[in-house]
Amino acid sequence: MLTELDLSYIQQLCLIENKLNEIWQSGEVPPGVLISQFNSYCAFAGLSLVSRQKINANSAQNKTNKYERKKPMN
């Protein structure tokens, strides 16, 4: 369920996207700060490619290195 804060966030995201589209349609290059802000808004909202990937953070920790040197036992 969306809250008022969520709607405000989505509104800001849409306004940034609209501004980017206006700049691109005028033939100019948008400022990097605006693109970066748009990307971070999308990532926070779960709309970026990375946020849609299923990444298991613990999988790297559970694997053992088969080339690791074993400590000699005394």
Image (spheres, rainbow, N blue to C red):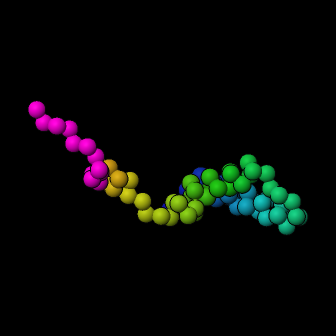
Majority secondary structure of the magenta segment?
loop
Q: What residue range appears in magenta?
A: 63-74
Q: Is residue 73 a member of the stretch shown in magenta?
A: yes
Q: Residue at x 79, y 64 (%)?
A: 21
Q: Nearer the viewer, residue 65 or 25?
A: 65
Residue most extreme to the bottom: 25
Q: Is residue 4 visible?
A: no
Vertical relation: 18 (above or below) 66:
below
Q: Position of 23 compared to 64: left or right?
A: right
Q: Position of 59 compared to 12: left or right?
A: left
Whole-percent x and y of residue 73? 13, 36
Answer with the quarter of the image where residue 47 lies: bottom right
Q: Residue at x 79, y 51 (%)?
A: 31
Q: How many marks?
A: 0
Q: Residue at x 42, y 59 (%)?
A: 55
Q: Residue at x 84, y 60 (%)?
A: 23
Q: Position of 42 compared to 65: left or right?
A: right
Q: Nearer the viewer, residue 66 or 59?
A: 66
Residue most extreme to the top: 74
Residue most extreme to the left: 74
Whole-percent x and y of residue 56? 38, 58
Q: Nearer the viewer, residue 62 or 52?
A: 62
State the quadrant of the C terminus.
Answer: top left
Q: Is residue 72 a member of the stretch shown in magenta?
A: yes
Whole-percent x and y of residue 67? 29, 50
Q: Nearer the viewer, residue 31 or 63?
A: 63
Q: Is residue 54 visible?
A: yes
Whole-percent x and y of residue 52? 50, 64
Q: Position of 63 compared to 29: left or right?
A: left
